[in-house]
Amino acid sequence: MLKIEGLKASVEGKEVLRGIDLEVPAGEVHAIMGPNGSGKSTLGYVLAGREGYEVTAGSVTFRGQDLLAMEPEERAAAGLFLAFQYPVELPGVGNANFLRQALNAVRRARGEPELDAMQFLKLVRGKVKALGMTEEMLKRAVNVGFSGGEKKRNEILQMAILEPAFCILDETDSGLDIDALKIVAEGVNALRSPERGMLVITHYQRLLDHIVPDRVHVLVGGRIVQSGGPELARELEAKGYGELQAAA
Amino acid sequence: MPAATDTLETVRDVTEGGYRWGFETPIEQELIPKGLNEDIIRLISAKKEEPAWLLEWRLKAFRAWCAMEEPRWAAVRYPPIDYQDLHYYAAPKRKAQPKSLDEVDPELLRTYEKLGIPLREQERLAGVAVDAVFDSVSVATTFKEKLAEAGVIFCSFSEAVREHPDLVRRFLGTVVPPSDNFFAALNSAVFSDGSFVYVPKGVRCPMELSTYFRINARNTGQFERTLIVAEEGAYVSYLEGCTAPQRDENQLHAAVVELVALDEATIKYSTVQNWYPGDAEGRGGIYNFVTKRGACRGAKSKISWTQVETGSAITWKYPSCILQGEGSVGEFYSVAITNNRQQADTGTKMIHIGPRTRSTIVSKGISAGEGQNTYRGLVRILPKAQHARNFTQCDSLLIGDRCGAHTVPYIESRNPTARVEHEATTSRIAEDQLFYCRQRGMTEEEAVGLIVNGFAREVLKELPMEFAVEAQKLLAISLEGSVG
């Protein structure tokens, strides 16, 4: 589903990704772990097409298409979703309004009919409840005045509504207490399916207790230095990244 | 708020593009010769079969205007206007005053339909009465009979002069005197039509009233005049909309609006101004020099101005409130967009005369392209305005790095018990906001439309529901091509 080959990327002239090879087939959840500054978030941004993240080498194929040639909104329409580590505030823009506009943008791209306000509300109500959110949060401005946990839940709500083919979760566990973490993990697990791929970026192993990955990759210094099954996450938790960093 | 959630349409409109109101109606018209002198004024007055007092009033205004200088203090630049090179009256040709819509030229009805303002009975906007002003004359007013049942007078200004001369004479020029300023004097001398509203004591006007101004003729100025009077305890909500054809030359628009609110009366006045703004290089567009002022004469009266200014090459406009009645309230909510080469110098004046008078100012300026946007506002507290209060909030949003936003607040307080607060912010649409929206599937232009609508939300929610959606779309369309 997602195939990354020899990917190198720079930010402000500094090479951050130094040759990444990674393949995530449909139906699998892969975790990217690594210390701060190893390039984890950069990988997410490069895949989503953020400005200022310059690809210098390599290729990314997503569902048979050349992902790197696409605009950010085309990647979203093709089914790529990035749950942000720091969700962005949009003052004055109602959360429900934002969600509906996003959904209809994606539906248009898929050739599906747009939803009107009533249809949308029906769809969103159920999902809000499942994520332990209140309908009041739909009326507030996007992420404005949201607690850390509310922001992350809001990301998962968007994911649940947009039903993307591929989800990248960038440090979705950061800033969450254990209860919020469980709710978010349940939300993510509910979206696991044989048709959907996921890339879970995290610094800590604890998220992976709740979202159990099929594969774990360790990113250090812009390269994947080790890959393995879910047990690799636990090993890292015990040993830390020190050894791998020294080796890289 | 449903209006804020309904941005589906925005998307479609944004992709369609351009100024969609820029067409010209092919219609035979009556134009008087170019130029401005006492004979021209006599001719206009004669065409309208006006009483002698009104002609005298016009001539007095003209003489005052001749001695006045065009104001130069606003932060707008434009080449000198040759006031002798304009037509001061243009009207669609017709045989007689149409008695019903069936007698109105179908071409005119089609024009308003294209503008989304159906005038025919079966297609009218439910709950909204419309006065349609085309160049210098009013072509139709809807729902007149229904309003008359409630005692509300809503008609063209010319008709008011004919049918209700005493009312017109009692209030005309009492809020904006003919010699108030250069453009008000010009308007007083040559004004041709506009709307008149009178809501009697204790009456709550049963529907929204609105006037749709359309400039069509070339090289013609539009000088309309609106007068709204709300007697004791009356309530009225009024909205005006404006569009003009797309042309390479500039056209002058100098209107005067006067509002009078007596004891416990409320007037809510909303504007969606979408005159042709000129092209990306700054060719063409309307010069919009407007004087709008409301007098809260009665105790606990209230006047609320809401404006969405997206059009015009130049906007010079300061809807104001004279808060005379004890405990009267003035409000000013404004969104002004300048894109490409548009320039806007707009704001308000709140003159606190009576005790316990209150005013609120919320101004949202959006600049894109090479647009220049100035908020200019005056809050004046006079010695007798015990415990007067004002709150002012001015926010500016910049898109791109070639535009400008300026805030010029003047505060004069001559009463120590008064409280005046002023807050101002300037921000840009951040790259991370755009990326966030695009990652969710929106194009860059949709994202800008969404963010701008969010920025302007506090003002948009003040608009009557019927127009809020329209205004929202307009904001997005006005900013086309401002990113990327």
Image (cartoon, grey):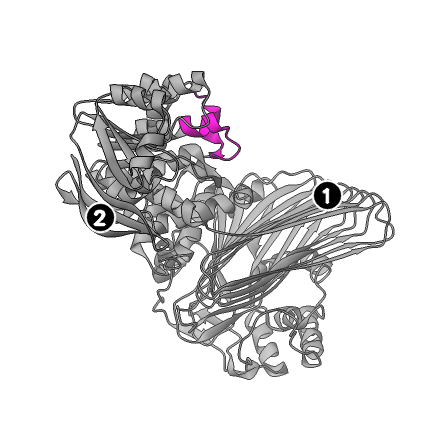
Q: Would residue B366 be found to the left or right of residue A236 on screen?
A: right
Chain under numbered label 2: A
In this rendering, is residue B413 above or below B190? Answer: above
Q: Say left or right for B359 vs A183.
A: right
The residue under the point 36% across, 26% down is A240
Residue A67 at least partly seen: no
Q: Secondary structure at mark 1?
A: loop
Residue at the image position 42 percent from the left and 52 percent from the top: B474
Q: Position of residue A27 (x, y in %)?
A: 18, 25
Comparing B41 with B291, the one in front is: B291
Q: Does the segment drawn in magenta span residue A206?
A: no
Residue type, mark 1 in image: Ser
Residue B168 versus residue B254: which sits nearer the camera?
B254
Which of the two marks, 2 or 1, is nearer to us in this view? Answer: 2
Q: Amino acid at mark 2?
A: Leu
Q: Position of residue B472 (x, y in %)?
A: 44, 47
State the separation of the CA atoms marked 2 and 1. 62 Å
Report the chain holding disc 1: B
Q: Which mark is residue B301?
A: 1
Q: Residue at x 81, y 51 (%)?
A: B353
On the image, numbered disc 2 is attached to which residue?
A68
- The stretch in magenta equals A133-153
| Mark 2, other Cα within 10 Å: few <14 / some 14–19 / many ≥20 | some
